[in-house]
């Protein structure tokens, strides 16, 4: 795992800004396990009872399945600010900003980006630590990657 770093989000709606999670909400990424290539979709087949093996259709090209990805985020800020910042981040992910819910995501550490991404869920077990220096919270969000092959590059 790398040192915490920024993730960039941009909504697919025309005119939506690219947002750096660190500068916008003070939220950094601890782990964003994008895959270069996901699992291949199952090939169509028939399984004849009176024959060995299976009768599989082999296309000219194999296609990649959509997948879920669990991302670990962290927030560190002034005392009593974590709830406001994390809720603002979640509101953005669910479309409260007026730009919809379809995301383009770029991971600055792996330099992998994807489009057709959406928020699915947040794990309810946040790890919260209040220190003399302020709030520290880690949390996991599950995203669905519907376009597993199109590479998005950072253009901010």
Image (cartoon, helix red, strand yellow):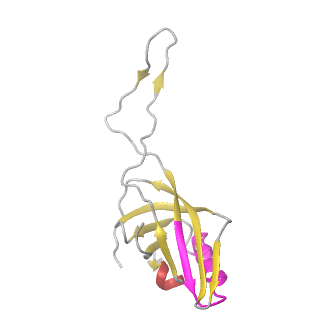
Name the residue at 62% across, 75% down: 91
Above or below, comparing residue 140 to residue 64 in the picture: below
Q: Is residue 84 magenta?
A: yes
Q: Residue furthest left?
A: 60
Query: Going by the picture, which residue comes out furthest to the front?
Result: 132
**Residue drawn at (61%, 78%), measured in percent from left and top?**
86
Q: Which residue appears at 36% of the width and 39% of the height?
A: 62
Confirm whether residue 12 shows in the render. no
Q: Position of residue 45 (x, y in %)?
A: 46, 25
Residue drawn at (48%, 21%), measured in percent from left and top?
46
Above-or-below relation of 146 to 75: above
- Residue 117 visible? The answer is yes
> Which segment is the magenta one?
72-98
**Residue 123 place in picture, x, y as percent:** 64, 63
156 vs 68, nearest the viewer: 68
Task: Name the image quarter holding the C terminus.
Answer: bottom left
Residue 78: % across, % down: 59, 91
């Amino acid at each position: 795992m790398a040192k915490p770093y920024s993730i960039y989000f941009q909504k697919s709606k025309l005119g939506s800004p690219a947002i750096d999670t660190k500068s916008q909400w003070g939220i950094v990424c601890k782990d964003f396990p994008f895959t270069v290539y996901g699992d291949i979709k199952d090939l169509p087949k028939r399984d004849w009872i009176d024959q060995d093996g299976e009768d599989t259709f082999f296309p000219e090209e194999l296609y990649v399945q959509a997948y879920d990805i669990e991302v670990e985020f962290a927030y560190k800020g002034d005392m009593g600010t974590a709830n406001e910042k994390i809720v603002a981040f979640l509101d953005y992910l669910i479309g409260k900003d007026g730009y919809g819910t379809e995301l383009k995501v770029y991971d600055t550490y792996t330099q992998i980006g994807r489009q057709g991404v959406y928020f699915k869920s947040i794990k309810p077990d946040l790890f919260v630590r209040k220190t003399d220096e302020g709030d520290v919270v880690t949390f996991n969000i599950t995203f669905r990657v519907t376009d597993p092959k199109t590479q998005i590059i950072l253009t901010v």
